[in-house]
Amino acid sequence: MLIGEFHHNLDEKQRLVIPTKYRMELGDSFVLSRGLEKCLCAYSNKEWEKLVNKISVLPFNKKDTRTFSRSFFSGATVCEFDKSGRINITSPLVSYAGLKTKCVIIGVNDHLEIWDEDAFNKFLDDNSSSLEDIAENLFDETVTL
């Protein structure tokens, strides 16, 4: 399970250090893709295959399926760690997520998300007051957090 929050800087060559605990979960290679809310998502090969299987059964005749698939798969790339535990993020992905220097790497159960620090702080600010309502909508009375 991927959990936690880490802050690292994107260097001038668009490399980002991924914390050791996350590297162990992701494996030697993994897939990095566009995420939702303008972040990047990193999936272990196992989790990527699960996601691909879910997407592959969606009806191709639906425009939403084609649009989502094009965006999601065209931005995906296989990554490997260098000897310093860094990954090289492609320019299109850096641009998509608006990554500047300061980045936030968070564990979200089955994947990582990489955010620009300002964008992540804005996301937290925008959603902090509605977390109780979100939890109420997602969970019934039998689930206790």
Image (cartoon, rainbow, N blue to C red):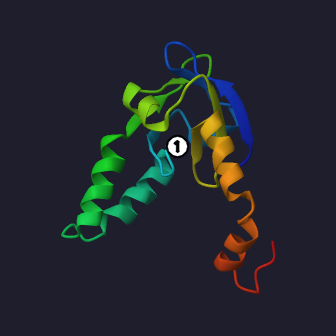
Give the percent coordinates (x, y) of residue 68. Answer: 33, 57
Name which residue lies at 66% across and 35% down.
104
Give the percent coordinates (x, y) of residue 46. Answer: 49, 51
In this rendering, would 125 be left or right of 58? right
Residue type of the residue flagged with mark 1 = Cys
Residue at mark 1: 39
Residue at the far left: name it: 61
Decide: few, some or many residues near mark 1? Use Cα within 10 Å; few <14, some 14-19, many ≥20: many
* Numbered disc 1: secondary structure: loop
Please tell me in which quadrant of the rendered image residue 58 appears.
Answer: bottom left
20 and 100: which one is in front? 100
- Decide if residue 107 is in sight here: no
Give the percent coordinates (x, y) of residue 52. Answer: 37, 57
Name which residue lies at 27% across and 57% down.
67
In this rendering, would 75 be left or right of 21? left
Name which residue lies at 60% across and 40% down.
119
In this rendering, would 16 be left or right of 5? left
Residue at the far right: name it: 144
Please tell me in which quadrant of the rendered image residue 135 appears.
Answer: bottom right
139 and 136: which one is in front? 136
Give the percent coordinates (x, y) of residue 10. Answer: 58, 22
